[in-house]
Amino acid sequence: NAGVTQTPKFQVLKTGQSMTLQCAQDMNHNSMYWYRQDPGMGLRLIYYSASEGTTDKGEVPNGYNVSRLNKREFSLRLESAAPSQTSVYFCASSERLLGFSNTEAFFGQGTRLTVV
Amino acid sequence: GDSVTQMEGPVTLSEEAFLTINCTYTATGYPSLFWYVQYPGEGLQLLLKATKADDKGSNKGFEATYRKETTSFHLEKGSVQVSDSAVYFCALTKPSGYSTLTFGKGTMLLVSP
């Protein structure tokens, strides 16, 4: 059981370039999330998808777009990368939104992105 | 808004020492509380959780008790191992239809033999 799979694991971009981070889960979860992790900042929510066909902004959505392609896949796109977007990006999924009791989030291994 | 505050690290211990990592929270209502662990090069894994006051979460020798009176959820382990070296995150969610995880900044634990 692979769980949550993110690709790529590492990426270097030049300022202004675009790229899409891919995330797929095989647990039949309804909800998916994108977080970024920066030193001394913990994890901050970028976007989330409560269920297939819906997406909503999180705490730090500026400069990003997302697509919930189907129930399994949730991609994060940087249209014009900036050095401030250098970070480690984590995708996560849960059976339903985390406000419900006994709901656990499962995380991917992360994508380390550097924008130069 | 909701927030989680953890003690700053790194916390450096010798094997078999007692571990405490402090976590306090600010939130309205009755949040659920979590500890996640991130081993080097990996994603986050749920370590333990507690969903109501006075609940104790436990896993792999780690424990944390939900203290509403002090808004705290401190992580403890009686005897740490080198393999416990990781970053530990305290987090909360609100018991509502929409909620996501609010994380603390993380505390790095380094255990030496």
Image (cartoon, rainbow, N blue to C red):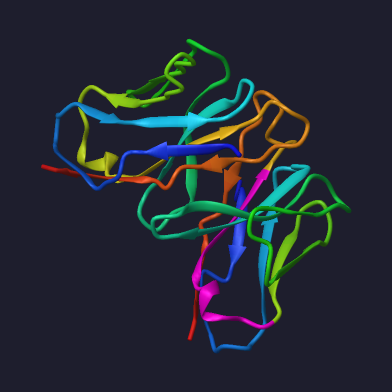
The quadrant the C terminus of chain B occupies is top left
Q: Which residues are magenta?
A: A80-93
| Tally of marks | 0
Q: Which of the two residues, B1 or A105, is positioned nearer the viewer here?
A: B1
Residue A81 to residue A105: above or below: below
Q: Position of residue A38 (x, y in %)?
A: 45, 61
Front in this rendered view, residue A87 or B72: B72
Asked whether, in this view, residue A65 is left or right of residue B70, the answer is right
When the figure is inspected, residue B101 is found, relative to residue B95, above or below; the finding is below
Q: What residue appears at the point 52 percent right and 74 percent down from the top-left corner?
A: A84
In the image, what residue occupies the spot 50% across and 73% down? A86
Give x and y (percent) for residue A29. 74, 42
Instruction: Give coordinates of residue B94: x percent, y percent.
Output: 65, 30
- Along the horizontal axis of the image, is A63 left or right of B57? right
Quarter holding residue A23: bottom right
Residue B60 belongs to magenta span: no
Of residues B39 and A79, the one nearer the viewer is A79
Compared to B5, does A116 lie above or below?
below
Residue appearing at x 39%, y 58% in the figure: B41
Q: Identify the residue at horizontal 14%, vertical 29% (top origin).
A: B16
